[in-house]
C-alpha cells in the first residue's frame, strides 16, 4: 500500500537514525567507501534532485517535449501529452527537505556554512516553485516536519507560497554573497558561490515574470522586486556559464543510445519547423532531419523546403501514415547518437536576457533597451548551438558571421510592443527545444503564445476539448492520507473540483 509522502519522510527519518548496532551493518560495510554523511554528500543529492531530469527514461523525456508541442509521435502508441492529456503530479520532490535540514546541521560552524545556507534557500525555492506551478496551493510552511509528528499538513495559498519563494531567493543572494567555494556541487559551477548567487537572482526574475498577471499585487511588489534585482547588478553574464548539468559517459543524455521503435519515430512539430523557417533560423538544421521524401524528390539537405513538420493535433493514424511515407522531419540524429548531448539548462544567460527584454517592454525596468536585451539573448542562444558538432548541421552551420547578421526580416526587433513580446516569447520557445520543456508550457499558459494547435477531434482534454489544460491534478496520496487539507485547498481554489482546466491563482 502506498504511504503518504509525509509519512514516508517520517519513516525514513526514524530509520536513518538507527546506526552502527547490527551485524548486517558490520558485514556490509565497504572499507573503501565513506561511511559518514556530510554536508557535501547531501548537497550533491539535493542539487541533482532539482537539476537532473527525473523521468524514468527517454519516453518520459519525450513526453515532456510533447506537452510543449515540440514533437509529434509515430511510435508504438499514442503519446497522451501530445494530445493534451494531463494527469496527477506528485509531491516526491519534498523528500529533499530532511536532507536540507541535515546539510545545514552538518555545516554549522564551518567556513562553508553560508554557502550551504544559500544552497538550501535556493533549493527549497526551486522545488516549491515547480510544485506550486503544477497544482496551485500546496503544503509549504508545514512541509518537511513529519519527523515532529506533523503528518497531515495544511495547504498554503499559492500567493503565500510564492511570497515565501521570493523571500528565500533574496536570502540565498545574501548567503551566497558571504559564502566561499563549497564542496559537493556536481553542476558546472563547482561550488562557486558567486555563480550560484547570480543564478539565484536570475531565477528570482523568472519567478517574478511568471507573476505578470499579478504585477499590481501590493503583497508581492512584483515590479519593484524585479527592478531591485536588476539594479543590484548580480545577474548572469556571458562568462558565468549556465546553471544545469553536463552530460557524459557516466551521466548520459536521456535520449542517447535509444534508437528504437519509439525514439527513432519522433517527428519535429510544425510549431517548431515553420517558425524557425519564418525567422530564417539555422537551428532548424540542428533540431531536425530533412524529410526522406523531400530528399528522394531531389531537394538538398541544406534547403529549408526539405524540412516538414507534423501538426501535433492531427490524428495519430494520419501522422503514422505520413511517417511511413517519409513525409516528415524526424528529430536530428544527434539526440540519439551523442552521449554527451546538449547540456541540461536550468538557468542560462540567453533566457535571462530575454526575460529582461520582456520586462523592459512591460516597463518594469528602465535600464538598457528591449532591443539590446533581445539581441544579446538571441546571440548567446545561437552561440550555444554553434558549439554543436557541425556534421549535424546539414551543411548549414551556425557561424559567427551568421549570428552577426541574424537580425533581419522576421528576426529584426519589431516596433510595436505586442509584436516585440511575441518575438521574445518565440525565442524562448526556440531556446528550450528538447531542453527544459515544462517551463515552456508554463509560459504558454501565461501568454497563450506561440499558438499551440488544438483539434477537438483528437484532444484528450475530455472536459474541454477545444483548450489546452491549465494544471495537473493533486496526488492521489493526498486524498488518501491528507484528505481534509487537500479538499479544503480544492474548495478554496476550484469550487471543490480537482480538474485540469481550472485556473490557479497565478493565472487569474
Image: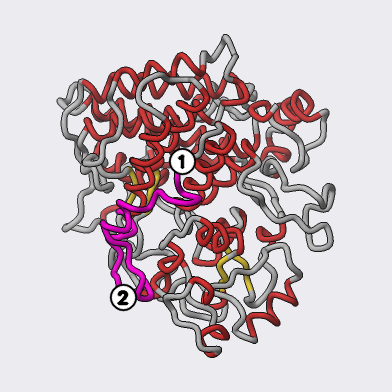
Residue drawn at 25 percent across, 47 percent down: 188
Residue 395 painted magenta = yes
- Rendered image coloring scheme: secondary structure
Measure the C-alpha gap from mark 1 to mark 2. Answer: 31 Å
Secondary structure type for disc 1? loop
**Seen from this angle, which residue lies furthest top?**
218
Mark 2 highlights which residue?
A: 391
* Nearer-the-camera pick, 160 or 41: 160
**As displayed, is residue 158 above or below residue 446?**
above
> Percent x, y for residue 198?
29, 31
Dot 2: within a 10 Å radius of its alpha carbon, few (fewer than 14), some, or many (20 or more) residues?
few
Residue 265 visible, this orientation? yes
Tag 2, which secondary structure? helix
The numbered dot on residue 401 is none
Numbered mark located on residue 413 in the image: 1
Give the quarter of the image for residue 384.
bottom left
Question: Do the residues under discs 1 and 2 have CB atoms within 8 angstroms?
Answer: no
Please state the horizontal and vertical placement of residue 411, each as a whole percent of the image.
46, 49
Q: Note whether 139 is above or below 410 in the view shown.
A: above
Residue 340 falls left or right of residue 259: left
- The magenta segment: 383-412
Residue 124 point in image, percent of width and height: 43, 31
The percent position of residue 341, horizontal first and vertical second, equals 34, 64
Upstream in the sequence, badge 1 or badge 2? 2
Picture residue at 60% right of the left edge, 58% below the top: 271
Task: Check the image and report above or below for 301 versus 363.
Answer: below
Looking at the image, is mark 1 or mark 2 nearer the viewer? Answer: 1
Q: Toward the viewer: 70 or 10?
A: 70
Residue at (56%, 26%) from the top-left corner? 211
**In the rendered image of this protein, does residue 194 appear above or below residue 75?**
above
Q: Is residue 27 visible?
A: no
Amino acid at each position: 500500500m502506498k504511504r503518504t509522502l509525509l509519512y514516508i519522510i517520517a519513516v525514513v527519518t526514524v530509520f536513518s537514525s538507527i546506526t552502527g548496532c547490527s551485524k548486517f551493518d558490520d558485514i556490509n560495510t565497504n572499507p573503501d567507501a565513506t561511511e559518514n554523511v556530510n554536508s557535501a554528500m547531501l548537497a550533491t543529492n539535493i542539487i541533482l534532485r532539482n537539476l537532473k531530469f527525473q523521468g524514468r527514461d527517454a519516453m518520459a523525456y519525450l513526453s515532456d517535449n510533447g506537452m510543449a508541442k515540440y514533437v509529434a509521435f509515430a511510435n508504438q502508441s499514442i503519446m497522451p501529452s501530445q494530445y493534451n492529456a494531463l494527469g496527477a503530479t506528485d509531491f516526491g520532490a519534498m523528500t529533499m527537505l530532511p536532507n536540507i535540514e541535515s546539510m545545514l546541521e552538518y555545516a554549522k560552524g564551518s567556513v562553508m556554512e553560508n554557502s550551504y545556507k544559500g544552497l538550501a534557500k535556493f533549493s527549497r525555492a526551486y522545488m516549491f516553485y515547480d510544485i506550486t506551478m503544477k497544482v496551485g496551493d500546496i503544503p509549504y510552511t508545514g512541509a518537511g516536519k513529519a519527523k515532529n509528528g506533523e503528518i497531515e499538513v495544511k495547504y498554503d495559498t499559492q500567493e503565500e507560497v510564492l511570497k515565501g519563494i521570493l523571500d528565500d531567493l533574496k536570502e540565498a543572494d545574501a548567503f551566497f554573497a558571504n559564502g566561499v567555494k563549497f564542496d559537493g556541487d556536481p553542476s558546472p559551477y563547482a561550488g562557486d558561490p558567486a555563480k550560484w548567487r547570480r543564478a539565484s537572482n536570475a531565477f528570482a526574475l523568472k519567478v517574478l515574470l511568471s507573476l505578470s498577471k499579478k504585477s499590481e499585487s501590493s503583497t508581492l511588489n512584483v515590479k519593484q522586486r524585479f527592478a531591485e534585482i536588476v539594479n543590484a547588478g548580480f545577474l548572469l553574464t556571458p562568462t558565468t556559464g549556465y546553471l544545469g548539468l553536463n552530460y557524459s559517459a557516466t551521466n548520459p543524455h536521456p535520449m542517447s543510445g535509444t534508437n528504437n521503435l519509439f525514439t527513432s519515430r519522433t517527428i519535429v512539430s510544425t510549431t517548431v519547423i515553420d517558425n524557425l523557417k519564418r525567422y530564417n533560423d539555422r537551428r532548424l538544421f540542428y533540431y531536425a532531419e530533412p524529410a526522406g521524401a523531400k530528399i528522394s524528390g531531389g531537394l538538398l539537405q541544406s534547403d529549408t523546403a526539405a524540412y516538414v513538420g507534423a501538426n501535433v493535433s492531427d490524428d495519430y493514424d494520419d501522422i503514422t501514415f505520413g511517417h511511413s511515407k517519409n513525409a516528415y522531419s524526424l528529430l536530428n540524429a544527434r539526440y540519439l547518437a551523442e552521449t554527451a548531448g546538449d547540456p541540461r539548462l536550468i538557468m542560462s544567460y540567453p533566457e535571462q536576457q530575454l526575460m529582461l527584454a520582456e520586462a523592459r517592454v512591460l516597463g518594469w525596468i528602465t535600464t538598457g533597451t528591449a532591443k539590446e536585451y533581445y539581441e544579446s539573448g538571441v546571440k548567446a542562444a545561437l552561440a550555444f548551438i554553434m558549439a554543436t558538432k557541425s556534421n549535424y548541421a546539414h551543411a548549414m552551420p551556425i557561424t559567427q558571421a551568421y549570428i552577426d547578421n541574424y537580425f533581419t526580416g522576421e528576426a529584426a526587433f519589431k516596433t510595436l510592443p505586442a509584436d516585440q513580446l511575441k518575438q521574445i516569447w518565440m525565442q524562448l520557445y526556440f531556446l528550450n527545444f528538447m531542453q527544459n520543456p515544462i517551463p515552456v508550457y508554463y509560459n504558454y499558459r501565461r501568454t497563450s503564445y506561440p499558438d499551440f494547435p488544438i483539434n477537438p477531434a483528437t484532444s484528450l482534454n475530455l472536459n474541454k476539448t477545444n483548450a489546452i489544460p491549465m494544471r495537473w491534478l493533486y496526488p492521489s496520496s493526498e486524498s488518501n492520507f491528507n484528505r481534509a487539507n487537500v479538499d479544503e485547498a480544492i474548495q478554496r481554489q476550484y469550487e471543490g473540483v480537482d480538474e485540469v482546466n481550472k485556473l490557479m491563482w497565478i493565472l487569474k
